[in-house]
Amino acid sequence: MKTIYIGIGFIFLSFFAHSQDNVVYNTFKTTRVINGHSTRMLWKHDLDFRITHRFGNIGGSNGGFPSFYGFDNATDIRFAFEYGVTNNLMIGLGRIRGNTHQRQNLDGFIKFRLLQQSDKTPVSMVVLGTTLYTMMNANPDIYSAYSYANTLQRFSYSSQLLISRKFGERLSLQISPTYVHRNYVAFDDLNGVFAIGGQAKFQVTKMFGILAEYFYLTKNKAIVGGVTRRDPLSIGFEFDTGGHIFHVNFTNASELGENLFIPNTTSQWSRGEFRFGFNISRIFTL
Amino acid sequence: MFKINLLIVIAAFLFTAFSSLKNESPSIKDILSTEVDEVLLTLGEKRPLHYTFKKNLSDTTKIRQGYEIITKGQTKDNNGKLSKRQSKHFVCIDCHNVVKEDPDLRYSNPDTRLEYAVEKDIPFLQGTTFYGMVNRENWYNGDYQIKYGDLVLPSRDTLINAIYLCSIECSQGRELKPWELNAVMAYLYQIDYKMNDLSFTEKELDQIEKALQGEGKTNAATLIKSKYFRASPATFLDPIPINERKMGVNGDPNNGKKVYDQSCLYCHAEGRITEYILDNEKLTFKHLKKHLGGHSKYSTYTITRKGTYAKNGYKPYMPNYTSERLSNKQLEDLVAYINQQSK
């Protein structure tokens, strides 16, 4: 019996007899991969002013030289302020123009880090909850998906669990199970959309990286209003200027914000319906 | 009975005699545990202007507040309310240690300081330590006038002005309030020089002991002051011209690693001060190596000597290393380490 107690005591002590974790940093250099969030958090007191822009189709019926490969058109724009409350908690408030019938959106999110990769923890893990509210005038057609009869119908929500791991110096991978719920949708649509995101970064040099992002919609690739919902696929390039992280990307998603680009992407890469976009941000210390 | 009373009187007389002798002659042990400024005052030296702040020496609340202002940038005032951060961008210990950083306080030698920093696991920084700050007689001396112009002139001879200048210009923050200044000074007087921080021979200690009894005070004071630098020397260097850079040839990468770990990473590690992150990844060393031969902000040769400046919209900046804080030999060692790690 004495031996058992001693054994339990050693096991208990072993929880304290560990060396300091070596935390893995720079899995991603900024809080977004391309359209979706990464597991990167803002440091406490950092205020991030972000501008995200998506142009028109490079090809397809609305693209090509007449629109200068989409530069004449802006499919979506987001301005946002995001803030590091603590090193593990950040909040954000943004304004999204919107590209489908749903316009004039306000989005707010809370993002919390549960785990950070280290020599003892294999992955980083973050939970993210986003709420979107549309301020647009309700469509007078009562059969429209945008004929908001009350305030609650203007809301949509998304919940994500972001799990990432950095492999060596160059490769980072992330998986992002996501659930989007829209309070009010068209009659032939479903309120809930479940997707699994896969994101990757390859660090070519210290200051330049290649990004990729794909969200697979597990169901709901239904035809809604005669249009098929497509999986958002994006490729991007990341430039680190030693003070700013600047992204340029190509994506078939025409909207910004998880509540919009995940359920509302209808463009196809194969038809040239992808666009150029950029993300810029400037961090201030408050 | 008479004999017993006589013995008691003799014993009392002897005890009193020995006690008074002890008070008149401080032992070596007493001298070594005494603060340097108190010994100097006893030897007739003039009180510095900031001596008035020494009245807070026993106020443990002020000392704790001062320590927190220096190490965290803020503290709770006497009403328990958390003060506004002194600077959004820096705290004092980002650039200054608060412990002894030179093994011999007579010399500001970056080579011996680096070895001492590794031995004591303290950062190897651009700014002079706060340890013994109150014992100095000049601040912002040497080439700091090149960087700050005439702003340094009122600070050269007055510690309080130097603290104000640092809090606004160097820290890119706000002026300290009077209670905060009192607290900071209370803490700085906790980390002033003691006589046992200085190196004396036995003969020199005898000289000081005699001086404290009245013999040769001026010479003893001069002797004590020669044991530590009373102004931290500051010589700015230009970046080594491109055609004179040895690019780490004959540099010692082991020594360069010490510079990288104790100095570069202190500010450039993730989550520290700057958004230009350095780490131990080969990609980082390749990037540094690529820029060695140029004049860009990524060039180790350039940035260590020139530093950067606070700009509107981006206030954090990199202070430059003077020759006393990083030698050209150490710079070549650092480059040798970069070359080694980039392979």
Image (spheres, rainbow, N blue to C red):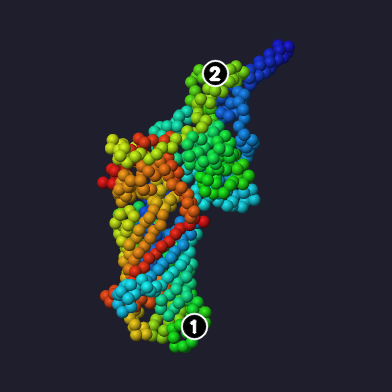
Which amino acid is tagged 1?
Ala
Residue at left offset 51%, top offset 25% = B226
Does the CB distance between marks 2 and 1 fall below 8 Å? no
SS at mark 2 in the image: helix
**What residue is disc 1 on?**
A138
Q: Is residue B52 visible?
A: yes
**Residue A31 placement (x, y as % from top left):** 41, 62
Q: Of tags 2 and 1, which is closer to the observer?
A: 1
Residue at left offset 48%, top offset 49% = B310
The number of discs equals 2
SS at mark 1 in the image: loop
Residue at left offset 61%, top offset 52% = B81
Q: Provide the chain ID for the residue under circle 2.
A: B
Looking at the rendered structure, which numbered label has been put on residue B32?
none
Q: CA distance from mark 2 to mark 1?
A: 94 Å
Which residue of the protein is positioned furthest toward the front in this rendering? A66
Looking at the rendered structure, which numbered label has been put on residue B207?
2
Q: Provide the chain ID for the residue under circle 1.
A: A
Q: Is residue B83 above or below residue A154?
A: above
Q: Is residue B120 visible?
A: no
**Residue A225 placement (x, y as % from top left):** 37, 85
